[in-house]
Image (cartoon, helix red, strand yellow):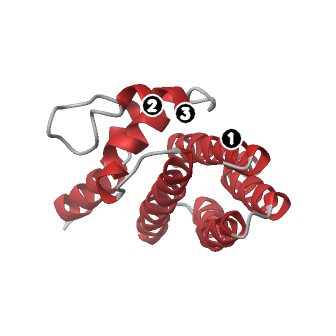
Amino acid sequence: MMATHLFVLFSLSSSLVPLASATSSPGGHGPSKDDGDIASICSHTDYVSLCINAAHTYGHAYAVIDAVSLLDMHIHMASDHTHTVKDLASHLAAKPSTSQSVKQALGICIKLYGDALDDLVKGRHAIKARDEGTANSMLSGVISYYSTCDDAFTEIPASNPLSKQDGTLMHIVSNALALAHLILSKGA
């Protein structure tokens, strides 16, 4: 039983590891012929290697990789990883060895991750409607949800077992904000 829980925990937490590298492999997961264009677009973000990784991880689903598709990939990536970290938080909260105060903080995070998923959808709709104000508000709100999860542990005080994932998620959405601004402010 313990081995199963460790396997689930390892599986959930290791699914965020690919975000650290942005390598291209010929015939691999994403496009390689457009790497120069991808790098050029990604240069407008704060986390360039993460942006390039999004293209290599999600690019196979797009006929063209441009700023619009890269933004969509970031929102998709944020949604995927938010689901993963929400599942991890639920798993940790269900463990009998988890203290009551940590379970409460995890409960706050679980709710916030649900709110983040909702606002990612609203942000995507605002972008399609070319409503930069709403898109900015929704995506900025998503970043604040991840940060508030961290704050829930600061108040206990206890270390947040999800802080690394929250940081990565903030970086993904920060890139999405930069791409949304690029697209919506320049009329791309």
Q: Position of residue 124 (x, y in %)?
A: 63, 66
- Check the image and report above or below for 108 versus 3: below
Instruction: State the residue at coordinates (66%, 72%).
Output: 125
The alpha-carbon separation of the residues under discs 1 and 2 comes to 16 Å
Residue appearing at x 72%, y 70% in the figure? 129
> Which residue appears at 35% of the width and 52% of the height?
58
Q: Which residue is more in the foreground, 146 or 21?
A: 21
- Which amino acid type is marked by label 2? Asp
Give yes or no for contact between labels 2 and 3 (Cβ–Cβ under 8 Å). Answer: yes
Q: Nearer the viewer, residue 37 or 96?
A: 37
Label 3 is placed on what type of residue?
Ile
Residue on which disc 3 sits: 41
Going from the N terminus, do you reach mark 3 or mark 1 first?
A: 3
Residue on which disc 2 sits: 37
Left/right placement of residue 63 relative to residue 186 reads left
Q: Is residue 60 above or below residue 37?
A: below
- Nearer to us: label 3 or label 1: 3
The answer to whether any part of residue 21 appears in the image is no
Which mark is nearer the camera, 1 or 2? Answer: 2
Give how far apart the Cα atoms at labels 2 and 3 are. 6 Å
